[in-house]
Image: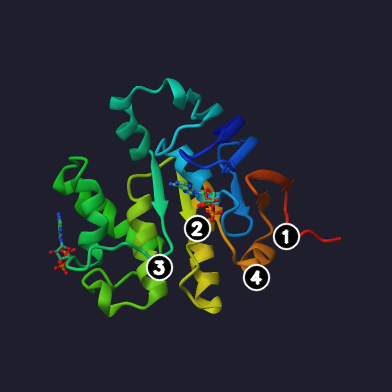
Amino acid sequence: MIHFDNVTKVYPNQNRPALQHVNVAIEKGEFLFLVGPSGSGKSTFLRLVLKEERPSQGHVHVAGKDLNRLTNWKVPHLRRRIGCVFQDFRLLPNKNVFENVAFALEVIGKPRRFIAKVVPEVIDLVGLEGKAHRMPDELSGGEQQRVAIARAFVNRPMILLADEPTGNIDPATSIGIMKVLDRINRTGTTVVMATHDAAIVDAFRKRVVELEDGRVVRDQSRGVYGQAY
Ligand code: ADP
Ligand code: ADP
């Protein structure tokens, strides 16, 4: 589903590569934690999958397509098939839960009847049943992140990218967020989650890819956050 083939990324006017010679193959339906210190290249990895950045060397393949060869006018189509969740939720403050989730479908022209059917289903899936009318500022951080996940997933993307999704949430609530991501993964969606959250990585025992100075230093199935020596 996502193949990094000897990918090096050097940003303009930087001499240190953000990623160097990265080889990672993520298959359909996998759940992968991307770990490593701040500045190790995690966000760059996610941006390359979205074609927000281009490799300086090597190739990124998503769903069988070499992104170097994907024409610009096809990039919106790629991004539509990839859901994104961020540390800071990024909800529309003037729209309620239903409207925040529905908006993701409205902008791609889905019919109103379809929206009215699928949005409540996804609101239930993320555990917000009964809260469709709430405004973001009437929700806890964990609930806001559930809305953001619902919005990212409502279009049934093939891939969900999550950048520090539990970074602003307390540990107990984070477990609930992870259960939602796990539920989404079990529908067949490939999930890649960049995180510093050692407790979460250790509790969920998924594949762990560790970056250090832009290099893959560990790729472990059912891994833990820190290398066990
Ligand atoms: P992480 O997400 O693990 O914190 P990043 O991918 O954001 O790591 O950063 C990797 C390296 O690339 C860092 O040295 C960072 O300073 C650099 N970097 C990231 N984005 C840019 C950019 N837009 N321009 C220049 N350098 C960048
Ligand atoms: P109720 O019948 O209890 O009012 P609805 O599911 O109809 O509940 O509406 C929930 C919220 O979602 C309301 O704030 C409404 O404005 C909004 N809403 C309902 N249907 C749509 C739609 N098709 N498109 C966008 N927003 C909608």
Q: Residue at x 50, y 58 (%)?
A: 181
As shown in the figure, which amino acid type bears the numbered disc 3? Gly
Crowding near the residue tagged with mark 2, few <14, some 14–19, many ≥20 C-alpha atoms within 10 Å? many
Specify whether 14 is left or right of 50: right
**Number of callouts:** 4
Indicate the secondary structure of the residue bearing disc 1: loop
Can residue 13 be seen at all in this image of the molecule?
yes
Label located before the other in sequence (3 or 4):
3
Tell me, for residue 181, which label it has, or none.
2
Q: Residue 101, position in %: x, y? A: 27, 57
Q: Residue 153, position in %: x, y? A: 38, 51
Q: Residue at x 39, y 23 (%)?
A: 70
As shown in the figure, which amino acid type bears the numbered disc 2? Leu
Q: Residue 23, position in %: x, y? A: 65, 34
| Mark 1 or 3: the one toward you | 1
Indicate the secondary structure of the residue bearing disc 4: helix
- In the displayed structure, would residue 95 be above or below residue 208? below
Specify whether 207 is left or right of 190: right
Crowding near the residue tagged with mark 1, few <14, some 14–19, many ≥20 C-alpha atoms within 10 Å? many
Tell me, for residue 127, which label it has, or none.
3
Marks 1 and 3 close (CB-CB < 8 Å): no
Which residue is disc 4 drawn over? 199
Label located before the other in sequence (4 or 1):
4
Tell me, for residue 143, which label it has, or none.
none
- Closest to the observer: 35 or 116? 35
Label located before the other in sequence (1 or 2):
2
- The Cα–Cα distance between marks 2 and 3, rounded to whole angstroms, is 12 Å
| Mark 1 or 2: the one toward you | 1
| Mark 2 or 3: the one toward you | 2
Label located before the other in sequence (2 or 3):
3
Q: Quadrant of residue 136?
A: bottom left
